[in-house]
Amino acid sequence: MPELPEVETTRLGITPHVESQTITKVTIRNYSLRWPIQSDIEDCLVGQHINHISRRAKYLLLHCTDGTLIIHLGMSGKLRVLDSADNVAKHDHADIQFGNGITLRYNDPRRFGAILWTQDDIQHHKLLEHLGPEPLSPEFNADYLSQKAQNRKVCIKTFIMDGKVVVGAGNIYANEALFLAKIHPKTITSQLSHSQFEQLVTTIKQVLEKAISAGGTTLKDFRKTDGQPGYFAQQLNVYGRDKQACYHCDNKIQTYKEAQRATYFCPLCQPLLN
């Protein structure tokens, strides 16, 4: 599923084409996404000017004249920038056309994504107001993370994947960051030192920045807005490499399930504390 780097890649891809443009037409072919698209969204959006586009966690925010269009890619969603609204394919659920002739097309085979319109203060929207800091922001630092971990007795991987703690450290990137920080994913938060939190914050930022630079990770469904895949999957150290040799020590990568998510680690590079 698209995680933060893939969503940020999408934001970077669509911004030059649709920012500062005016919506001229909206076509909804399927209103039944994760949350139903409001029936009058076409009337709400036509004539809206896109002032700028931002991202909060995995939500794309198109800030318009009179409100905000929220797009969530869900499990399999993607946005394409097209020169025309022709050649509609299966699962092309929505088109947003602009005055410059560009069409922003939303495709989502599993329909777990969302297209929502709000005129309320976006910072206090129910989907966003309880989220933790952005991982690449100054607010996400070792002091913050160690303070949030106080009196918490939970596995560190589960902890950093909690969106109320920090957004964007999804399963792929949590595995990779823990490996680079040499922290076993089952380590209890209270066992970590401040220096380990510093190292973990650093590796989370590094992994996400590298993934964004590489255009996101292609596993199954994600494609960039130009239709090309992301290439970060070629740089993964542990994720998806069960029983393969660790690049650092040649020991075999191991895996287990945690909270129904596949967890990968190197038992030699990431020793479990007693």
Image (cartoon, rainbow, N blue to C red):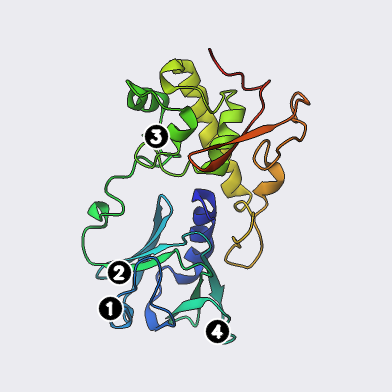
Q: For mark 2, what is the residue?
A: 117
Q: Earlier in the sequence, mark 1 or mark 4?
A: 1
Residue at 77 percent across and 32 percent down: it is: 245
Q: For mark 3, what is the residue?
A: 138
- Look at the numbered disc 3 and give the secondary structure of its residue: loop
Q: For mark 1, what is the residue?
A: 44
What is the C-alpha distance between the residues marked 4 and 2? 24 Å
Q: From the image, state whether disc 3 or disc 1 is nearer to you.
A: 1
Please, is residue 228 above or below residue 246 in the view?
below
Q: Given the image, on which type of amino acid does mark 4 rest?
A: Ser
Residue at 43 percent across and 53 percent down: it is: 58
Q: Which of the 4 quarters of the picture holds residue 125?
A: bottom left
What is the C-alpha distance between the residues marked 3 and 4? 40 Å
Q: Given the image, on which type of amino acid does mark 2 rest?
A: Trp
Q: Earlier in the sequence, mark 3 or mark 4?
A: 4
Indicate the position of residue 116 as horizontal and vertical percent values.
33, 67
Q: Which of the 4 quarters of the picture holds residue 184?
A: top right
Please, is residue 272 above or below residue 235 in the view?
above
- Look at the numbered disc 2 and give the secondary structure of its residue: strand
Residue at 69 percent across and 42 percent down: it is: 235
Horizontal side of residue 36 vs 171, given as left or right: left
Q: Given the image, on which type of amino acid does mark 3 rest?
A: Pro
Q: For mark 4, what is the residue?
A: 84
What is the C-alpha distance between the residues marked 1 and 4? 22 Å
What is the C-alpha distance between the residues marked 2 and 3? 30 Å
Please, is residue 210 above or below residue 60 in the view?
above
- Residue 103 in view here: no
